[in-house]
Amino acid sequence: MKENSNLKESEIIRTLYPPGSVQTDDCYLDEEGRIYTTDTISEGTHFRTEWSGPREIAKKLVEVNVSDIAAGGGVPTKAFLNLGLSAKYSKEEWILPFSETLSEILSSYGISLCGGDTYRSPSLNLTLTLVGTTALPWKRSGGKKGDFLYLSGSVGLSQLGYKILNEDLKVPEPLRNLSLEKHLSPKARLNVAQELSKNFPVSSCMDLTDGLLQDLPKLAASSELGLEIFLEKIPLIDGTSSFLSLGEALSSGEELELLFLSPKELPNTLCGIPITKIGTTTSEWKGVRYFEKGTEKNFEHFGFEHF
């Protein structure tokens, strides 16, 4: 008898929906212009309590959800919180700083906490659901032939932060602090998304959470297009290439940068954040192909997967 193998995340998601109706976006848009997202961060998968304290965990919980709303072209307004707390982390000395930081970050975005649930759990499992509004939603499926592919910020810092913590890697300042901050407390690009929404056409958008090597195929598949990536254009912070291979930088997850398509040439910066054109679309083939100065390059390892 053949042993059953574990399903990948994408395969699990497909089993939950009727054929042909799989939800490929991180947000859901209703008929009245409300946009919804929900995300869970769990101990051991999305954070380690020996690295992240209650304040870092609260911040990350809010930012990963705000990032989804930003990538959907929306503005978050309401939040619902589910707390799965182990005995160790239901004590006042952990809950108070978590609650204070959660309130501060939600308030900074103008988000009201409207409800939720609390339950006992063997480990920390924290879920936030956000509701927002949008006048012009962005879908991953909206890409068109001839669009330019853009990336906000840079890639690689989150992976470098992980290596610093996991391998006790010695990295000079200020690169060390930048990397640790990106890994432990990434920040959503809501300000960039709002500037884009007001002033520039965006065909398709998603936030960078699983690394370019995993997220680019999702964008290409949703829009049923080919993506041609120019590896020499990938934005890296000075010094990161001394500690990361190109493959590691491309698989760096939870960067929370915006990955989007637009038919227009865009400015090099928006809201003080670099905007880099890293590729183009094509209808001649589907999927993602990587080129380094005209020569195609392949990658064997695609980074961390949840399953």
Image (tube, grey):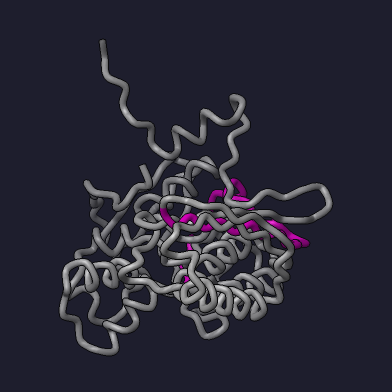
| Picture mark count | 0
* Looking at the image, residue 222 lies above or below residue 260: above
Residue closer to the observer: 26 or 91: 91
- Seen as rendered, the residue at the extreme top is 1
Q: In the rendered structure, which segment of residues is drawn in magenta?
A: 123-152
Point out residue 229 in the picture as x, y percentages from the top left corner.
37, 57
Point out residue 204 in the picture as x, y percentages from the top left corner.
59, 55
The quadrant where residue 262 appears: bottom right
Residue closer to the observer: 89 or 246: 89
Q: Is 140 in the magenta?
A: yes
Residue closer to the observer: 40 or 225: 40
Q: Identify the residue shown where x is 55% and y is 55%.
A: 39
Residue closer to the observer: 26 or 7: 7
- Does the image show residue 148? no
Point out residue 132 in the picture as x, y percentages from the top left corner.
72, 62
* Looking at the image, residue 243 lies above or below residue 37: below
Q: Identify the residue shown where x is 54% and y is 49%.
A: 145
Q: Identify the residue shown where x is 32% and y is 71%.
A: 51
Q: Is 305 in the magenta?
A: no
- Does the image show residue 2? yes
- Seen as rendered, the residue at the extreme right is 32
* Looking at the image, residue 182 lies above or below residue 21: below
Point out residue 87 in the picture as x, y percentages from the top left corner.
44, 59
Task: Indicate the quadrant containing the N terminus: top left, top right, bottom left or bottom right.
Answer: top left
Q: Identify the residue shown where x is 21% and y is 73%.
A: 241
Task: Indicate the quadrant containing the C terminus: top left, top right, bottom left or bottom right.
Answer: top left
